[in-house]
Image: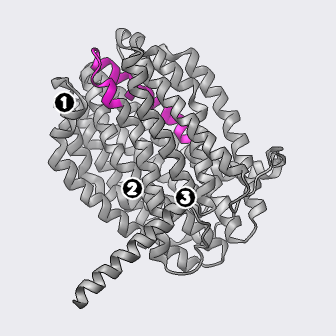
């Protein structure tokens, strides 16, 4: 009887925690239980990133059942690989915004936090305008450069044009969410992705099948869905109910603040550009050694991997907010403890996912494609990539901890050495010199990620991140 009462009490506390995390309250994370703080941030962040990963899976499901499914899946994957540059800028700027906003909130200065967030938006939109225009104009050439055949590239040109042209929506979606997370309100970030995804799930079959736009319909649905999510974010920024109270005056450029944000964001953007360029190189290497179907299989496996990885990235994002706010409150030891608690949760999550993907890779891929050649390449890719999941989980928490402290230089060096000096050469040697083809590329990924995690652990324990001024 006593055990039943304890179980009931624990379940009740969990649901109270879940309800509070999804409610979107403004919480001070510089005091109280660290474990509770991690969960309050992590639950909406994980659901937010799960929704971001659903975008790719919804597109993969519908285009994977089109008549030219290998062309369609390859186009979606290669376009996403190029869009990774946009994601890099968006994530880099959002990290800078999260670090500065969290630090100002920790210092109890919400007006300065609001101004910093709006200046980050000015920078991001200006940079992304150039990428969007070039991507729209040179869509076909980009696909060919990525290793696509001429026939496949021409088939996917309209999809790539729409996705590249509308990439500013991706930029805003990430950046606004980084601002909300820095303020400690991860629930709004989560809800914006839920709204965007519901729209995408409804619109995808309409534009792809009912209106018969095919692959192009997937791009239209995704862009509209994300745009609706951005509108929801804008409403919450300007309604004056949260910690951040934004007015149009905050969008007036402030040179000093812009310089400060760029100083923090530049290494952050660089670290993700380094990673993105590595993924682009790997995608091209697979296309060269495995052809259009090999490329489609690899891109399918990556979509499955990212579906599980993005929630882990969301969980690890709790470390960035907790580190930023606690350093702002002059509590470096609490900040460090927060990272260890977050890492423990993430390692457990990724361990469970590793078992699931190893056991269910075959069934997963038959659900997403009706092409047996694509399936036969994707299944071993999923199993090989999942070998390093536990290390991915610990590594991404440490990377987010550095970034949340404003120390974006350390992860940049880790990425440069790990991706360009190790992963790319290893993938090339295995794929071409030893004739492993796409399989060599698959193995290079978990090996490199594991070594990068070991490096992060060593650098984190040195503690220099605690002294960074933002």
Q: Which residues are magenta?
A: 60-89
Labels 3 and 1: the sequence-earlier one: 3
Label 2: which secondary element: helix
Figure quadrant of the C terminus: bottom right
- The answer to whether any part of residue 267 appears in the image is no
**From this viewpoint, which residue is outermost toward the bottom?**
2
Quadrant hosting residue 184: bottom right
Separation of marks 1 and 2 at Cα, in angstroms: 25 Å
Q: Is residue 261 left or right of residue 318?
A: right
Q: Is residue 43 left or right of residue 330?
A: left
Which of discs 3 and 1 lies nearer the camera? The answer is 3
Label 1: which secondary element: helix
Is residue 79 placed above or below 408 in the rendered structure?
Answer: above
* Residue density around tag 3, few if under 14, some if 14–19, many if 20 or more, within 10 Å: many
Q: Residue at x 39, y 41 (%)?
A: 54
Is residue 423 placed above or below 346 in the rendered structure?
Answer: above
Labels 1 and 2: the sequence-earlier one: 2
Is residue 19 placed above or below 274 in the rendered structure?
Answer: below
Name the residue nearer the viewer: 203 or 94: 203
Quadrant hosting residue 60: top left
Residue for badge 3 = 186
Predominant SS along the magenta part: helix
Magenta span includes 84: yes
**Res. 312 mark:** 2
The picture places residue 96, in percent across and down from the top left corner, at: 63, 53
Is residue 57 placed above or below 358 in the rendered structure?
Answer: above
Residue for badge 1 = 375
Separation of marks 2 and 3 at Cα, in angstroms: 15 Å
Q: Residue at x 71, y 41 (%)?
A: 123
Figure quadrant of the N terminus: bottom left
């Amino acid at each position: 009887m006593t055990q039943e009462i304890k179980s009931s009490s624990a379940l009740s506390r969990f649901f109270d925690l879940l309800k509070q995390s999804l409610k979107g309250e403004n919480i001070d994370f510089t005091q109280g239980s660290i474990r509770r703080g991690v969960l309050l941030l992590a639950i909406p962040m994980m659901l937010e990133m799960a929704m971001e990963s659903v975008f790719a899976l919804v597109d993969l499901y519908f285009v994977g059942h089109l008549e030219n499914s290998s062309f369609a899946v390859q186009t979606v994957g290669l376009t996403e690989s190029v869009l990774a540059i946009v994601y890099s800028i968006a994530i880099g700027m959002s990290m800078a915004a999260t670090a500065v906003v969290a630090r100002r909130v920790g210092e109890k200065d919400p007006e300065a936090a609001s101004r910093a967030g709006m200046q980050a938006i000015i920078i991001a939109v200006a940079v992304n305008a150039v990428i969007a225009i070039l991507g729209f104009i040179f869509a076909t050439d980009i696909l060919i450069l990525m290793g696509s055949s001429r026939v496949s590239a021409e088939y996917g040109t309209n999809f790539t044009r729409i996705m590249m042209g509308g990439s500013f929506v991706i930029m805003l979606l990430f950046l606004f969410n980084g601002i909300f997370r820095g303020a400690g309100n991860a629930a709004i970030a989560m809800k914006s992705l839920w709204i965007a995804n519901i729209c995408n799930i409804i619109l995808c079959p309409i534009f792809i099948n009912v209106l018969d736009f095919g692959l192009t319909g997937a791009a239209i649905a995704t862009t509209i869905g994300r745009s609706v999510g951005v509108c929801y974010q804008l409403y919450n920024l300007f309604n004056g109910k949260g910690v951040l109270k934004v007015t149009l005056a905050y969008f007036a450029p402030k040179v000093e603040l812009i310089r400060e944000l760029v100083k923090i964001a530049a290494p952050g953007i660089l670290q993700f550009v380094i990673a993105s360029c590595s993924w682009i190189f790997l995608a091209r290497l697979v296309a060269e050694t495995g052809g259009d179907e090999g490329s489609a299989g690899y891109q399918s496996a990556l979509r499955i991997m990212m579906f599980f990885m993005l929630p882990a990235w969301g969980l690890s994002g709790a470390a960035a907010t907790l580190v930023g706010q606690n350093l702002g409150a002059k509590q470096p030891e609490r900040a460090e403890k927060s990272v260890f608690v977050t890492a423990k949760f993430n390692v457990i999550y990724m361990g469970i996912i590793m078992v699931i993907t190893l056991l269910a890779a075959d069934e997963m891929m038959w659900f997403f494609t009706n092409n047996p050649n694509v399936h036969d390449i994707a299944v071993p890719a999923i199993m090989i990539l999942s070998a390093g999941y536990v290390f991915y989980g610990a590594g991404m928490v440490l990377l987010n901890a550095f970034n949340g402290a404003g120390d974006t230089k350390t992860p940049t060096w880790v990425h440069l050495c790990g991706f360009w000096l190790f992963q790319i050469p290893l993938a090339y040697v295995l794929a071409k010199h030893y004739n492993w083809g796409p399989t060599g590329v698959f193995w290079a990924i978990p090996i490199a990620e594991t070594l990068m995690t070991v490096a992060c652990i060593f650098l984190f324990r040195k503690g220099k991140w605690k002294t960074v001024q933002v």
